Image: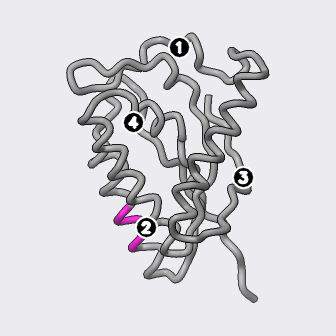
């Protein structure tokens, strides 16, 4: 008798007093995790916080470069047969990049319901489109099929 195990991971920067670096919090652990999943001949779903990417792309050259590294890893995730899906942490709307670190001390928009319905819908549309565009560089007809709430 075989059993199915569903593996899912949140692909996001830890947001606490010390959010960690992209290299140590995302790229290195995810690379090791992908190798372990491949070794076990498994597959996984990575729920990607699209607002993280959006705000990293908009902040400065340093964060934009990190966002490009993340995007390359997301393509690698898809290339290896895993899924990327939508995850939204709205606290990114209030995040500030100060002295090389993200500050998440403002919780004004911690929950999606702190936004009007039109803005929430716009986030879903924008996030779905962003992730599909990334994945479609590997699989032309890729569709985002799932969402996991944050906050």
Q: Secondary structure at mark 3?
A: loop
**Residue 143 place in picture, x, y as percent:** 69, 60
Cα distance between the residues tagged 3 and 2 = 19 Å
User: Circle 1 sits on which residue?
Assistant: 107
Mark earlier in primary sequence (4, 1)? 4
* Circle 1 Cα neighbour tier, 10 Å, few/some/many (<14 / 14–19 / ≥20): few
Q: Are marks 2 and 4 in contact (CB under 8 Å)?
A: no
**Residue 133 place in picture, x, y as percent:** 56, 55
Above or below: residue 19 compared with residue 24: above
User: Quadrant of the image for the C terminus?
Assistant: top right
Mark earlier in primary sequence (3, 2)? 2
Q: Are marks 2 and 1 in contact (CB under 8 Å)?
A: no
* Circle 2 Cα neighbour tier, 10 Å, few/some/many (<14 / 14–19 / ≥20): some
**Colour scheme shown:** one colour
Q: Are marks 3 and 1 in contact (CB under 8 Å)?
A: no
Above or below: residue 73 compared with residue 25: below
Q: Secondary structure at mark 4?
A: helix
User: Circle 3 sits on which residue?
Assistant: 146
User: Circle 2 sits on which residue?
Assistant: 76
User: Quadrant of the image for the N terminus?
Assistant: bottom right
* Circle 3 Cα neighbour tier, 10 Å, few/some/many (<14 / 14–19 / ≥20): few
Cα distance between the residues tagged 2 and 1 = 33 Å
Q: Main secondary structure of the magenta part?
A: helix
Above or below: residue 39 compared with residue 50: below
Q: Secondary structure at mark 2?
A: helix
For image coordinates 43% across by 67% down, the residue present is 76
Q: Tell me, for residue 57, which label it has, or none.
A: 4
For image coordinates 58% across by 26% down, the residue present is 90
Which residues make up the magenta segment? 31-35
Cα distance between the residues tagged 3 and 4 = 23 Å
Mark earlier in primary sequence (2, 4)? 4
* Circle 4 Cα neighbour tier, 10 Å, few/some/many (<14 / 14–19 / ≥20): some
């Amino acid at each position: 008798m075989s059993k199915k195990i569903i593996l899912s991971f949140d692909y996001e920067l830890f947001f606490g007093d010390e959010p960690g670096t992209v290299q140590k919090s995302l790229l290195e652990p995810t690379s090791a995790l992908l190798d372990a999943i491949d070794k076990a001949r498994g597959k996984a779903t990575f729920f990607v916080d699209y607002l993280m990417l959006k705000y990293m792309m908009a902040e400065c050259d340093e964060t934009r470069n990190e966002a490009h590294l993340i995007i390359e890893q997301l393509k690698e995730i898809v290339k290896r047969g895993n899924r990327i899906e939508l995850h939204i942490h709205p606290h990114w709307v209030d995040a500030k990049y100060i002295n090389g670190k993200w500050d998440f001390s403002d919780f004004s928009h911690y929950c999606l319901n702190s936004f009007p319905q039109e803005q929430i819908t716009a986030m879903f549309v924008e996030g779905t489109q962003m992730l599909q565009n990334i994945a479609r560089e590997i699989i032309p007809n890729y569709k985002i099929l799932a969402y996991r709430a944050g906050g």
